Each structure stands twice: as structure tokens, then as C-alpha cells.
Amino acid sequence: AQKITQTQPGMFVQEKEAVTLDCTYDTSDPSYGLFWYKQPSSGEMIFLIYQGSYDQQNATEGRYSLNFQKARKSANLVISASQLGDSAMYFCAMREKTSYDKVIFGPGTSLSVIP
Amino acid sequence: DAGVIQSPRHEVTEMGQEVTLRCKPISGHDYLFWYRQTMMRGLELLIYFNNNVPIDDSGMPEDRFSAKMPNASFSTLKIQPSEPRDSAVYFCASSWRAGEDTQYFGPGTRLTVL
């Protein structure tokens, strides 16, 4: 069964606009971490933002914020003021304590920023 | 810190040949992960180590794949014999601790098996 779901295979956003990339997850572990990574066309995997299951506040890192809704098991990434350089694949990932800290990635969302 | 180092960056080989991919994690990191990325299957976790010990190898596709971590600063992923369907980008990643700690990825090795 899919533990990480990213329902948007491809997204388009106008430059300078905000965009939300969806991520839902499935776990019964009370202790877990959620991550977002960016993979540009050059291929490297770049860490963007982290949210812990016990964190009370939503994580923010510059233009990136994570809309964490624990009861709904969703961890959507919000990118504000999109830039052309934001065009990339975006992966949501989860790390579960009871799975010996195994990390599972979602299928990814391709974001294209339009000038 | 130099980050996670992988070698080679590109490998082209013929079907049936042995392939060895190498990874040097970030110094001090306790966890090391091997991933494979293809268009069809996305990013798959193959195996990961904690303190040089394999914890979960359930993602290793078949017996042709093996991975070792003889010490804290070096790991190998070996494919013998290689097949065209093994063509993919192989990533190594490391992290310091469990739980909230972020994985840092190497640049990847692009493997092409002809």
C-alpha cells in the first residue's frame, strides 16, 4: 500500500504566484518526520523543509512552508512568490520511528513555473 | 564538509558485467541509504545501514544486488551480473540520527547497461 501519496503529477504556476503541492501519508506510528525535497533537471536531490509529528507549529524555511494537518495526515508544501528556478520535481517523504527510521518517498510532483 | 560522495558519476557497461557503485557518507553520519530512481518506478529505497549494519534490505530487487558497508566511511552497491533493466540513477544518502534528521543525498551515479 502506498504510504505517501502525491496526487498531482504535474502543476503549473505563474511566476511570483504561490503554489501548493499536496502530500498525504499513511502511518500508525505516533513518531514520524515529514520531508520535502526538490529535484531540478540537473538531478540532485535538495532538502527543503522538515516537519516533526510532535511539532506544534507549521515549519517554514524562507519561501517554503509546510501546511501540516495531522488529523488529515497531510503535509502540503507551499511555495510563495514562485521563481523560474523553482521548476523541478518535488518529493514528499516520511520517516517512521517504528520502521527503524526507514524513509519512504512519494511519486513526486513536477512543477513548472511560467514567466 | 564535502557532502556525500559517489563514484563513478556515470557508468556504461554491457549486460552480464559486474558493476560496483561507491559511496562515502558525510563524516559522523550513522545512517546510510541506497536508492534507485527510474521514470517508471520513481525513487525506491534499496537498502539502508545503521552504524554499518544493514537494517532493511527488503528493497533489493534480487540476488544480483548486494551492498556492503565495511566501515563508517565507505559503502558499495554491487550488481552481478548486470542487466539492461538495471539502468537507472543510483543515489546514496546519509543522515546523522534517527527521527527528524535530514538525509543528505549524493549526486547520484547514472548507470546504463547495454
Image (cartoon, rainbow, N blue to C red):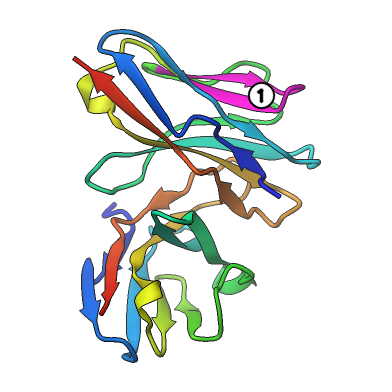
Which of the image's four quarters has the C terminus of chain B?
Answer: bottom left
Nearest the camera: B73 or A51?
A51
Q: Is residue A74 magenta?
A: yes
* Nearest the eye: B1 or B112: B112
The local crowd at label 1, few if under 14, some if 14 to 19, many if 20 or more residues have their Cα within 10 Å, is few
Q: Position of residue B9 (x, y in %)?
A: 22, 66
Occupied quadrant, residue A29: top right
Write the residue at 71% across / 28% down. A73
Residue at the spot x=31%, y=91% of the render?
Answer: B17
Chain that bears disc 1: A
Q: Main secondary structure of the magenta part?
A: strand
Magenta residues?
A64-77
Residue A17 spot, x, y in % from top left: 33, 8
Q: Is residue A23 left or right of residue B34?
A: right
B50 to A38, vertically: above or below: below
Report the amino acid beneath label 1.
Asp
Relative to A103, A83 lies left or right: left
At x 51% / y 52%, what residue is drawn?
B96
Q: In this rendering, does residue A103 appear at all?
A: yes
- Give the image location of residue B54, x and y in percent: 60, 73
Label 1: element kind:
loop
Question: Does A33 lie within the magenta span?
Answer: no
Q: Nearer the viewer, residue B58 or B75?
A: B58
Q: Residue at x 65, y 53 (%)?
A: A101
Work out whether A43 lies above or below A80. Answer: below
Q: Position of residue A70 (x, y in %)?
A: 72, 23
From this viewpoint, is residue B31 visible? no
Q: Quadrant of residue A76?
A: top right
Report the residue marked by disc 1. Answer: A55
User: Which residue appears farthest toward the left when viewing the image?
Assistant: A115
Relative horizontal placement of residue B66, taking residue B4 as reference (left or right): right
Query: Residue A88 is drawn in which quadrant?
Result: top left
